[in-house]
Amino acid sequence: MDKTLTSHAGLLAWVEESTRLCQPERVHWCTGSEDEAQWLISTMVAAKGLIPLNHDEWPNCYLHRSNPNDVARVEDRTFICSQSPDDAGPTNHWMAPDEAKKLLYSIFEGSMKGRTMYVVPYIMGPAGSPFSKVGVEITDSAYVALSMRIMTRMGKIALETLGTEGAFVPGLHSTAELDPEKRYICHFPDEKERLILSVNSGYGGNALLGKKCFALRIASALARDEGWLAEHMLILELEDPQGEKLYFTGAFPSACGKTNLAMLESIFPDWKVRTIGDDIAWLRIGEDGRLWAVNPEAGFFGVAPGTSEKTNPSAMETIRSNTLFTNVARTDDGDPWWEGIGPAPEFLTDWKGERRPGDDTAGGRFSQPNSRFTAPAKQCPTISPHWEDPQGVPISGILFGGRRNDTMPLVLEANSWEHGVFLGATMASQTTAAAGGAQGVLRRDPMAMLPFCGYHMGDYFAHWLEMGKRIPNPPKIFHVNWFQKDDEGNFLWPGYGENLRPLLWARERILGVGEAIETPIGTVPTPDGMNLEGLSLAEGVMERLLEVNHDRWAQECDAIAKHFETFGEKLPPALSAELEALRQRVG
Ligand code: SAT
Ligand code: MN
């Protein structure tokens, strides 16, 4: 698009300023058209940045291999550049805004020499929704431009929404040298326009600035100011045999099965689960007093390994066409391949481009553990007809959950909104490959927002508590844990489609039925309170899945107390009170 097609003075000025700074060879304004996408693809294929896949089996699908030093989010290089470090809080890295700008602009200077600068206007949220927000990402990565076209409503439509005066969140991104030592992802939540600056990474949440940077970190700060919630949550629709629908959101850390749960294949033919979103929810109080959720994204950036016809047939269908694969392996037939998709063929080209015998397990994994697919949400066979409703969908239940070997039962109902916020604030999960650093380490990840909250987490807890007071008809809150293990390290619960059972119990509790027992930590199903029809678990396993172990919970109280110390004076008294009450009950 010619830049004369927008007359938004602020946008034109910022693009000009960025052009002067980054010195690209040319500037391309993205329209979002199919022709443009094909042009970007052919440019990238010619430059070996994209590898075509088997067109008959995987139409319009391509493989991208990132730099091996750039395969995940980098939490230690992600900064909240609020005016005061106290606003970033103890769980975020902070840099003074002026210092951050000086440092990053010095890296941006001349960083796009010889390259094309893409101006990518995009909407987070459905076009025409009163809750949607516009962003513009300037990037030197065609891969980012193509990915943004899948993940957001990108191009002309965003410029039309913006008009000549509209507000937008500016995001400047350059892959620069891909130097991990100079990799910075910076957010400026106190700026009027809430700037994002990102350099030296081309990967996922570091580079697709609409996603974690805008729709979570910046949006969480907007939500605090404007009285709503921006959360790291899937949104799903549950339809009963009579056709009545009920909606859940679920907050789980990255790579803990959000996409699988959002696309859950129902084990009971009369019950349907449909997808609204798999990663982010923007939640507002509706005129009817309920909490309403919108998925701000238009695509899925899902973890490939482990995805198969067996674990997630809907995802497999979603990614059959028009999908970008990042860091997966490739078969000699040009099919994408990853661990967990099925048997390995005789030869595979691994994610770094090396062709090896498929049984060469000694040579390491073929797909990168955080390899991904980027696919349009509208291709999902289970997508709900309501997924783009401008007002969103009304939420009846909120699920919090992490990966824990023990301690947390399969499903637990909170006693109240405050207790639910406590369950969210004390969530813990083993770390995964979605971020750099050690994996499998148990860490507290409040509301699955530890890497994504754009302000002080203590204030964030207070905001959640405040929202509870303001929602006349709040959702019920649950905690779930699909990941308990036995003494030999085997999962106790089969997960995937079977997760419908705890979900149905939660629905019954929302409707005021459902057999339950109160425990010191909350309410759990009676051993036969969940529908267990057709499920054969070994003797005693169900009891173990729902067990509340007093010794473990005494330790858990101590661990929570330590976690709470992190927030100092900003820890809301209601949460210390919840901990004290828990201690009393655990005894
Ligand atoms: O942040 S990413 O978009 O790279 C994926 C995730 O961690 O959820
Ligand atoms: Mn995520």
Image (cartoon, rainbow, N blue to C red):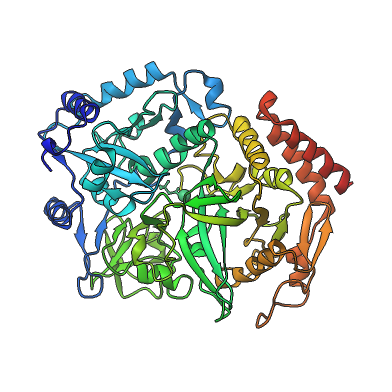
Q: Quadrant of the N terminus?
A: top left
Going 58% across and 79% down the picture, which residue do you hit?
268
Toward the viewer: 84 or 183? Answer: 84
Going 52% across and 20% down the picture, which residue do you hit?
85
The location of residue 145, given as percent across then percent down, is: 24, 46
The location of residue 428, given as percent across then percent down, is: 64, 47
Residue 159 visible to the viewer: yes
The location of residue 176, given as percent across then percent down, is: 24, 34
Q: Quadrant of residue 536?
A: bottom right
Q: How many marks?
A: 0
Toward the viewer: 426 or 387? Answer: 387
Going 53% across and 51% down the picture, which residue do you hit?
292
The location of residue 276, given as percent across then percent down, is: 46, 60
- In the depicted structure, whether residue 8 falls above or below residue 215: above
- In the depicted structure, whether residue 122 falls above or below residue 99: below
- In the depicted structure, whether residue 5 falls above or below residue 535: above
Q: Is residue 80 left or right of residue 152?
A: right
- In the depicted structure, whether residue 156 falls above or below residue 12: below
Residue 444 visible to the viewer: no
Toward the viewer: 218 or 292? Answer: 292
Q: Is residue 78 left or right of residue 453?
A: left
